[in-house]
Image (spheres, rainbow, N blue to C red):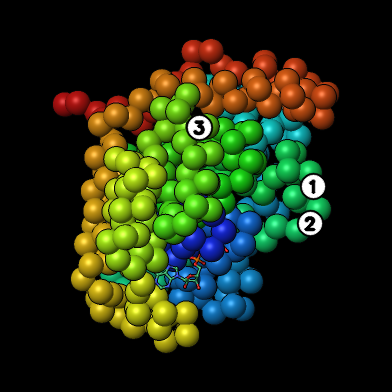
Amino acid sequence: MKIAFVGKGGSGKTTLSSLFVRHLATTGSPVVAVDADINQHLGPALGLTDTEARDLPAMGDRLGLIKDYLRGSNPRIASAETMIKTTPPGEGSRLLRVREDNPVYEACARPVELDGGAVRLMVTGPFTEADLGVACYHSKTGAVELCLNHLVDGPGEYVVVDMTAGSDSFASGMFTRFDITFLVAEPTRKGISVYRQYKEYARDFGVTLKVVGNKVQGQDDIDFLRGEVGDDLLLTVGHSDWVRAMEKGRPPRFEELEDGNRRALSALLAAADATYEQRDWERYTQQMVHFHLKNAQSWGNERTGADLAAQVDPAFVLREAETATA
Ligand SMILES: Nc1ncnc2c1ncn2[C@@H]1O[C@H](COP(=O)(O)OP(=O)(O)OP(=O)(O)O)[C@@H](O)[C@H]1O
Ligand SMILES: [Mg+2]
């Protein structure tokens, strides 16, 4: 299951992603946590020291390796240089699985021990001014998008992405790569404005979007959110002393998280799991092709000097391996 946390800066994306990842770890499910935000904070929120977080390998620095592994022997992708962030897999491409070991995880993922078990953590790497200027070709989240487009995940295994709600993810199609997107919103007009923008982009692509109210203090806050987003409001989370203690560098055992917040995390998981039934690999593949053609035309062909539309394998559909029948 592919799950994104998006929202306005400071709304609580990282906090809620990290709590959700901790919750998943207690269930024993395999988890890959990905920090794809401009502000890279997921590592510390999962308990890493600043030094440990700084030493994490950056996916953005290992794009060559990622591309070479994923393109495998796909004859339509002649070189890593012509592989852009939206290049879709085809016959001969290598696919990623949540549970396996592979060279991409080996290069880019690090285990993080949590109460209940370890998860894999991957980070795009911190963004610099220069990155933000040339958001297309060298986009750091491009590495995440490539991985999501080559991932064949099944129920009970999770990829959780702490994401920014920036324009980069709309241009590239990144926002369509998830089974469910949790939009974290404080009960303020600014929090809601990001929701409206997201909703508009999401509408045409069948994106499952649910609002998670955060830092909610009372019924008035809940009423406000309900009035603004209606049934898209999944649940609300209040101030957490557990989170505050963690921020002070004194993380309590996870089992000491407040009951209400624990219930909220269970509800998030239930909502994510419930989307599996609607999963449609054909549509998922069509959407990646749609965004690839769009990116090829708007900048990719010119930048690489190749006809990137030719990378599309018309017969290919990304999907889970058929389980062998006896
Ligand atoms: N429910 C909560 N209870 C207590 N503190 C919270 C809660 N949610 C968020 N915070 C605090 O609010 C601050 C911002 O949260 P967080 O870093 O998760 O937001 P973000 O959306 O990831 O921000 P950024 O856009 O900077 O990445 C943090 O100090 C965090 O500890
Ligand atoms: Mg954050």
> Which of pointers 3 and 1 lies earlier in the amino acid sequence?
1
In which quadrant of the rendered view does residue 30 lie?
bottom left
Q: Does the beta carbon at disc 3 come under 8 Å from ligand 1?
A: no
- Locate the C terminus by quadrant: top left
Q: Secondary structure at mark 2?
A: helix
> Which of pointers 3 and 2 lies earlier in the amino acid sequence?
2
Residues under numbered marks 1 and 2 in contact, where contact means CB atoms less than 8 Å apart: yes
Left or right for 20, reference 258: right
Indicate the amino acid at tag 3: Glu
Left or right for 58, reference 2: right
Q: Which residue is mark 2?
A: 129
Residues under numbered marks 3 and 2 in contact, where contact means CB atoms less than 8 Å apart: no
Left or right for 64, reference 216: right
Indicate the amino acid at tag 2: Glu
Nearer the observer, disc 3 or disc 2? 3
Return the residue nearer the eye: 218 or 293. Answer: 218
Indicate the amino acid at tag 1: Gly
Q: Which residue is mark 1?
A: 133
- The residue that appears at 47% across and 24% down in the rendered structure is 204
- Locate the N terminus by quadrant: top left
- The residue that appears at 39% across and 61% down in the rendered structure is 214
Q: Does the beta carbon at disc 2 come under 8 Å from ligand 1?
A: no
In which quadrant of the rendered view does residue 208 lie?
top left
- Near mark 3 (Cα within 10 A), the count class, few <14, some 14-19 or many ≥20, is few
Return the residue nearer the eye: 318 or 7. Answer: 7
Q: Secondary structure at mark 3?
A: helix
